[in-house]
Structures are given as structure tokens and as C-alpha cells.
Image (cartoon, coloured by chain):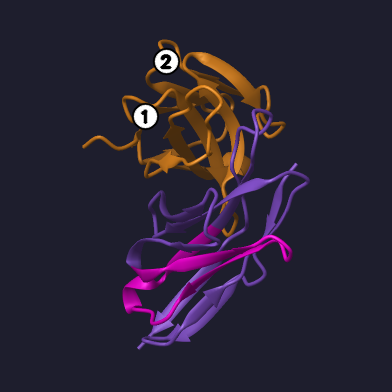
Amino acid sequence: AQSVTQLDSQVPVFEEAPVELRCNYSSSVSVYLFWYVQYPNQGLQLLLKYLSGSTLVKGINGFEAEFNKSQTSFHLRKPSVHISDTAEYFCAVKGRGSGFQKLVFGTGTRLLVSP
Amino acid sequence: DTGVSQDPRHKITKRGQNVTFRCDPISEHNRLYWYRQTLGQGPEFLTYFQNEAQLEKSRLLSDRFSAERPKGSFSTLEIQRTEQGDSAMYLCASSLSSGTTNTGELFFGEGSRLTVL
């Protein structure tokens, strides 16, 4: 089975500052990794995904994440945040192979961007 | 609009009543998932379908819950004899799985928020 730990439940940051949202996962098999964003009263929107290849993944809205297999991490970063980035961010993992059919989500990190 | 759609977006009901949610996935997607999200938590897997077959159910899905996808297109999630603990956002997602390729990328709907009084 897979699991995800998002170490920070809330991250406050000022506009135009850099931000990092941390994600660690646990799995006995190789994985696919995802970051989703959720705005209030809405569903989840895919920000970026790691499937294979380059460990640095770029996504929408200027976000990027780096897959670190040795540290089992997939931290999300943005060099300069906007007020509109205020939202809940979820890291998710899925095991590779036919025996793993669902995404497992972390508990989320609320990003609060203030002026 | 070719995204995942869910109906109703909001439902308020009294304890003991039955409720049904509908999900229309992206048309070419063969997989359909239901997740539940409570306040301050991440989505928790409930069940999924490949075409019309329900292939996995979580232990979270008590016998009061039933999901169907009769023609492999839209799906319904019914909750019988609702309890206050059923209050949550019910999220539907779809994906395309072909052969052995299933990266797990899900496309989510806006969710159906249930409040049980």
C-alpha cells in the first residue's frame, strides 16, 4: 500500500515570495506522483505529475516539483507566489503496476498568500 | 463542456433520508472513481468502475452506500438512511486506462456537498 504525508497543514507566505510545500510518500513499489490544487468549493485540478524521466517536473501556473527517490519526497515549489495561489494543495501517489488502481492522497496543505 | 460533471452540487437532507448523486465522466474515459472528502482532509477512495464493472470498494463504503454505472457511462452513488457522519463532499473523477497503461491521472468534477441535519 502507498501513503502520503504532507508535513505542513498550513503555509502562510507574502505575495511575490517563494514557497515550498512538502510531500513525502511511502511505497514498496515504484510510484507515480501528483500534485492537485483545490480552490474553495471546487473539485481538484491537476497541477503537475511525475511519471518517469526527468525528476524536475514543471506544471501549470509556474509551479514545479522535484522527485527525490532516495528521500521519497516530491516537494512543490514556486519562485514567486500570487494572491490567486491561495488554495488547498494535495499530494497524491499511485503505485505502478496492475495491482494498484487508485490515487492515495495526503491530508493537504493550505497555502495562504497575503499582500 | 467536456469535463466531469456532478449533480447536485449541494444537498441538504435530514438524518434517515436517502440521497443520490450523479456523475457524468469525460465521454471517452472508461474508468470512474468516487472519493469522499471531509473538512480538512484529503480525498478518500470509495470505489471505482472500469466500464460498467465495479472493481474495488473501500471499507469506508458501508452497506448503506451503493454505486452503479449501468451502461458504462454515468454513475450514481446512493446513500440510504443518511447519518450526520455522512456529511462530506463526494467527488467523482474519471480516467482513461488502456491495456496495462494506467498512470492514475484523474480528472475531477466539482463535487457534491452533502449536509445531513
The verdict on residue A81 being magenta is yes
Q: Mark 2: which secondary structure?
A: loop
Which mark is drawn over residue A105?
none
Q: Residue at x 56, y 26 (%)?
A: B100
Earlier in the chain: of badge 1 and badge 2, it is: 1
Residue on which disc 2 sits: B72
**Residue sticking out furthest to the left:** B1
Inspect the image, locate mark 1, and give the three-letter code of the amino acid beneath it: Pro
Q: Considering depth in this image, is A106 or A80 the residue closer to the camera?
A: A80
Please give the residue where the numbered disc 1 appears in the rendered image: B25
Task: Answer left or right for A99 relative to B23.
Answer: right
Tell me, what hue is chain B?
orange
Give the amino acid type for the residue marked by disc 2 in the picture: Gly
Give percent across and percent down for residue A106: 62, 56
Q: Furthest residue to the front? A: A53
Considering depth in this image, is B82 or B61 the residue closer to the camera? B61
Q: Position of residue B33 (x, y in %)?
A: 51, 32
Res B6 seen here? yes
At a point 40% along the width and 72% down the height, the residue shown is: A86
Residue numbers of the magenta segment: A62-90
Q: Is residue B41 above or below residue B70?
A: below
Chain painted purple: A
